[in-house]
């Protein structure tokens, strides 16, 4: 069962701070020099502030990982380890594809951490993390999950197409 409170809090944060939302990047430092054309085009009218931008999963990690016992690895802010371990980015890449991360893994990519530990969503509900979702599409997906609707079926049926940006 999805953690509705966290799901809604992440969505609200993204809506309150569109200048720090980039659905195509897990977690990224924003500077005027590293904004890509699609970031600017997808977010027409949004003036980006220097600082951290992230997608839905990235913001879930930034908002809740520490509280749940995880911290980002400095070399790669997309990889999280359980607080108190000395695991490195190399440890993550050595196990990638060999060991499927579970909710009690000591090292996880932010997408797995967000899905399994923070938001507690089903594999099908990971459509939230698709890089071409606009904020409007994210709101519809979150609403469907909160209301117990089959967000994946709606996604596959094209119900969110008018909310999905073609640039993604």
Image (cartoon, rainbow, N blue to C red):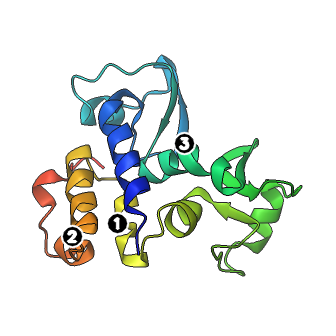
Residue 127: image tag? 1
Identify the image quadrant of the N terminus: bottom left
Q: Secondary structure at mark 1?
A: helix
Q: Label 2, on which residue?
A: 155
**Of pointers 3 and 2, the one earlier in the residue sequence:** 3
Identify the residue at image location x=17%, y=72%: 154
Tell me the crowding category of disc 3: few under 14, some 14 to 19, or many 20 or more residues within 10 angstroms, Cα based: many
Identify the residue at image location x=27%, y=32%: 43
Can you say whether 72 is above or below 106 in the image?
Answer: above
**Of pointers 1 and 3, the one earlier in the residue sequence:** 3
**Nearer to the camera, 20 or 25:** 20
> Do tag 1 and tag 2 residues touch (Cβ < 8 Å)?
yes
Q: Residue furthest right?
A: 86
Image quadrant assignment for residue 113? bottom right
Q: Secondary structure at mark 2?
A: helix
Identify the residue at image location x=54%, y=42%: 27
User: Could you tell me residue 110's position as x and y percent?
Assistant: 58, 56
Residue 3: image tag? none
Identify the residue at image location x=62%, y=51%: 65
User: Does 54 sit left or right of 102 as displayed?
Assistant: left
> Do tag 1 and tag 3 residues touch (Cβ < 8 Å)?
no
Q: Give the Cα distance between marks 1 and 2.
A: 8 Å
Can you say whether 31 is above or below 27 in the image?
Answer: above
Q: Label 3, on which residue?
A: 27
Can you say whether 100 is above or below 53 in the image?
Answer: below
Q: Secondary structure at mark 3?
A: strand
> Do tag 3 and tag 2 residues touch (Cβ < 8 Å)?
no
């Amino acid at each position: 069962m999805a953690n509705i409170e966290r799901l809604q809090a992440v969505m609200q944060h993204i809506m309150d701070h569109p200048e720090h939302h980039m659905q195509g990047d897990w977690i990224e430092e924003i500077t005027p020099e590293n904004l890509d054309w699609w970031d600017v085009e997808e977010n027409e009218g949004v003036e980006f502030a220097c600082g951290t931008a992230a997608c839905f999963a990235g913001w879930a990690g930034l908002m809740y990982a520490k509280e749940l016992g995880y911290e980002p690895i400095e070399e790669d802010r997309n990889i999280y380890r359980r607080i108190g371990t000395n695991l490195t980015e190399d440890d993550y890449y050595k196990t990638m594809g060999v060991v499927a991360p579970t909710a009690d893994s000591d090292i996880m990519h932010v997408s797995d951490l967000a899905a399994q530990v923070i938001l507690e969503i089903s594999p099908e509900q990971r459509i939230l993390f698709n890089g071409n979702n606009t904020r409007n599409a994210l709101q519809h997906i979150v609403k469907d999950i909160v209301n117990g609707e089959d967000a994946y079926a709606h996604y596959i049926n094209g119900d969110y197409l008018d909310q999905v940006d073609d640039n993604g």
